Image (tube, coloured by chain):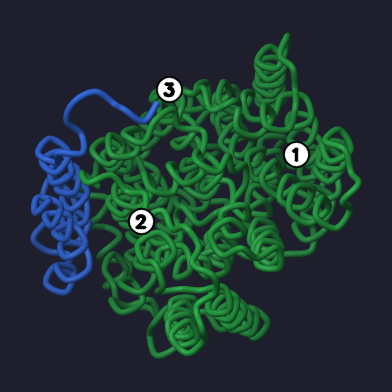
Amino acid sequence: MAIRWLAILPPLAFLVGVLFANSVTPYVLGLPFLWFYISACVVFTALVMIVVYVLDPANKGPELQD
Amino acid sequence: MHSAALVIIFLTVVIALILGLLAARGKQMNLQQWTVAGRSFGALFVFLLMAGDIYTTFTFLGGSGWSYGVGGPTLYILSYGSLAYVLAYFMLPRIWRYAKTHNLISQPDYFEQRFQSKGLSMLVALVGVVAIIPYLQSQFTGLGLIVEIASYGSISAVWGMVIAMFVIAIYVTLSGVRGSAWTAALKDIVLLAVVLFIGIALPLHVGGFSAMFHKIDALKPGFLTFGSTAQGIPWFISTVLMTAVGFYMWPHAFGAVYTAKNERVFRNNAMFLPLYQLILLFVFFVGFAAILIVPGLTNSNLALMSAVTKVYAPWFVGVIGGAGMLAALVPGSLMLIGASTLLAENIYRPLSRSATPSQVQLVARVLVWVIAAITLFFSANSNATIVALLLMGYNFVTQFFPAVILGIFTQRGANRIGAISGIVVGVILVAIFALTGTSIIWGLNSGFLAVIANAIVVLAVSAATPSSAVVESPSAKATPAD
């Protein structure tokens, strides 16, 4: 179940990372840096959860609950 | 032909009502059917139901209104959903399993079963309804504004709200939750198309994305980041934390968890629902473009509709207004069902032990109209921003979180007296903040401080009081894999 600890990364990215990203410049993809950063955190969250889902033994095998 | 806008909006509402009626036809409508649709929804429907829950008047008009009015702090709306899904991965399968084992229907049932307390369950029902009213009010406010603007001022916002109340209440009375799911499918497609279109076309209209942001930054230095207003980084962190943990504490969201076919649905959702959040960006872009298209609006809720009216022909204003109607109808109907079921099932039934199921159902259907009328009264007498209304609702529902999380993950972290004390302390603090208009304390969201106080009280009181007879906790039933 150690893989589930990866899920701590998205909150750190949003809530701690924002301290270092609160700036308009540099612009990335036309967005102010802060806006790009938070958007990137959303994508990062999905990627992390895909890794967690795929490697989590709870999602292996047939769904037994129903 | 300004009337084209209203005609298109009217047709949208008629289609939604027909979908609602078709969904309900030929089905035996008992209360369980009406609220959780017999636990028969698959992943796609749960996805749509939950997505329908998320994309509301709050994001459509409130989100664009906030990017227009406050700028950088709007990013909290983009952030909290993603973190809510991460938490859901761990929390919802346990809640779902517990609900299925004990055949629970509504959120207070969970508290009653877990803490063996009718009083706690009634308290939770009452607080849930109190929280739903500002949320519902935000939908009515949005609908009123859409009708007012799409009629080019010939129908006032208050009459727009009256019409909205009747549409939502009739819709709920006819169809229940199945109607919500069908209309959610329609709404998601229409809204996605509309938001993507205006979220790209309006920024291009003012010179393109990069040029738009540069112009805003030159006009209002600091507006696009945190810190230019009272809503700085500490506010962002505390607000995201509070709303992320409160996300599934809404009675209708908690109840929607029960409609899943199996528990893996929630883990699956955690992979894909965060990406869906990115379409919020386009709504925010509309608000930014509106700064350059219709500067100086006194009511920021109007940003999207005003910009659209200025740039596009009436028929297209009607399409966007119709999308806005659907954005309010789906969550509005879920909230009305949630609130009326809470009162009928968790307060009326225990107080009136002789009530038959059909009597409880009748009470629920009457309460739909009572709650809609009360909300209409508040809506017509308020000028709060849509986002502020939603945050007020969050302040209340988040007070359930400490008892829920301790209840599902620990055996003794929270007991009956602890859970009751924590919720009472949290709700009293939130009520004081609401009455005194205190939304920020020491740079932090005041609701966040209330939930911290609540958690401390739950833990301290539970530790200090003798544990009530050991109640079966979901963690005791967890499979080894979980």
Res B42 label: 3
* In this rendering, position of residue B228 left or right of residue B129: left
**Do callouts 3 and 1 point to residues on the same chain?**
yes
Q: Is mark 3 on a helix, strand or loop?
A: loop
Res B164 label: 1
**Up/down of B361 relative to B422, above or below:** above
**Do callouts 2 and 1 point to residues on the same chain?**
yes
Rendered blue, the chain in question is A
Foreground mark, 2 or 1?
2
Residue B276 location in percent, x, y?
32, 37
Q: Colour of chain B?
A: green
Question: Disc 2 to disc 1, how far (Cα)?
Answer: 43 Å
Viewer-nearest residue: A41 or B7: A41
Query: Does the image show residue B312?
Result: yes
* In this rendering, position of residue B5 left or right of residue B69: right
The residue carrying mark 2 is B475
Q: Is mark 1 on a helix, strand or loop?
A: helix
Query: Does the image show residue B228?
Result: no
Residue placed at 64% from the left, 86% from the top?
A: B436
The 10 Å Cα crowd at callout 1, few under 14, some 14 to 19, many 20 or more, is: many
Q: Quadrant of the N terminus of chain B?
A: top right
**Up/down of B332 relative to A7, above or below:** above
**Badge count:** 3
* In this rendering, position of residue B212 left or right of residue B57: left
The 10 Å Cα crowd at callout 2, few under 14, some 14 to 19, many 20 or more, is: some
